[in-house]
Amino acid sequence: NAGVTQTPKFQVLKTGQSMTLQCAQDMNHEYMSWYRQDPGMGLRLIHYSVGAGITDQGEVPNGYNVSRSTTEDFPLRLLSAAPSQTSVYFCASSWNRPYNSPLHFGNGTRLTVT
Amino acid sequence: AQSVTQPDIHITVSEGASLELRCNYSYGATPYLFWYVQSPGQGLQLLLKYFSGDTLVQGIKGFEAEFKRSQSSFNLRKPSVHWSDAAEYFCAASGSNDYKLSFGAGTTVTVRA
């Protein structure tokens, strides 16, 4: 099993550009989430989904959109990139709520916005 | 507000020495507590978790953590560190009604020969 796969690994954007970070999991997990990791701030939740067709906002959702059309995929869209969105982005999934089942993380996407 | 605090940003330890990483939480009720480890260039991996019961929990890679309600702490320990333990360690917490984990800022561990 591949687990949680994120693409791309690295991306450089110019301010105002849009892009989609891809996340796919092959474990049939219902719960999927996106975190961003910034130095000294740990991981902060951007958006999460508890199943296909259901998404909700986390702590820092502004500037990001998500959708969940299938169980496997949970893409994160940056509509108009800003330098403040320079970060490392992690997708994570679990079979149930994260307190009740361990989160499986992808290897991350390092995004730089200039 | 719910929060998780890791007071130490960076710890350096000699190989073979013991390691203790501190974690404090602020939650309305006793949360579910976790320690995750992140090796360079990788995602996070669960080391151990505390839900209830025995306050000393064992995890993978020889790690253990002790829950102390009176101190709102959940410190991670390892008796003898190996060079491969060099990584960043995150403490996290969640309530039973939460759909998220709250992470601390992380502690980077450097292991010297």
Image (tube, grey):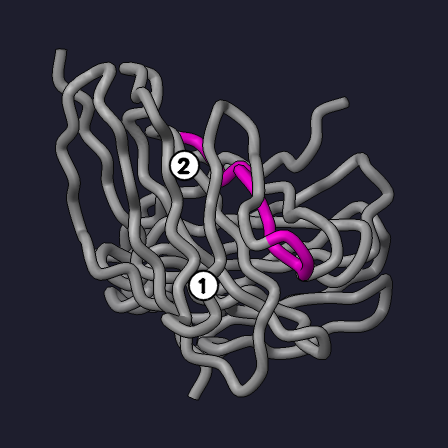
The label number, if any, that marks residue B50 in the structure image: none
Say whether residue A7 is visible.
no
Viewer-proximal residue among A34 and B4: B4
Please indicate, yes or no, whether residue A56 appears anywhere in the rendered image.
yes
Side (left or right) of A44 relative to B32: left
Q: Which chain is disc 1 placed on?
A: B
What percent of the width, then of the height, locates residue B15? 21, 16
Q: Name which residue type carries label 2.
A: Gln
Residue at position x 65%, y 67% from top? A48
- Residue at 13% x, 32% y: name it: B12
Which quarter of the figure is the C terminus of chain B placed in? Answer: top left
Q: Residue at x 83, y 60 (%)?
A: A69
Protein chain holding label 2: B
The residue stretch that appears in magenta: B42-54
Which residue is at 23% across, 35% downward? B109
Q: Where is residue A82 drawn, in percent x and y?
A: 30, 68
Magenta region includes residue A22: no
Q: For mark 1, what is the residue?
A: B68
**Element type where label 1 sits in the image:** strand
Say left or right for A110 vs A46.
Answer: left
Q: Gap in Å between the C-alphas at discs 2 and 1?
A: 24 Å
Number of the label disc, if any, that sits on residue B38: 2
Identity, as a three-letter code, of the amino acid under mark 1: Lys
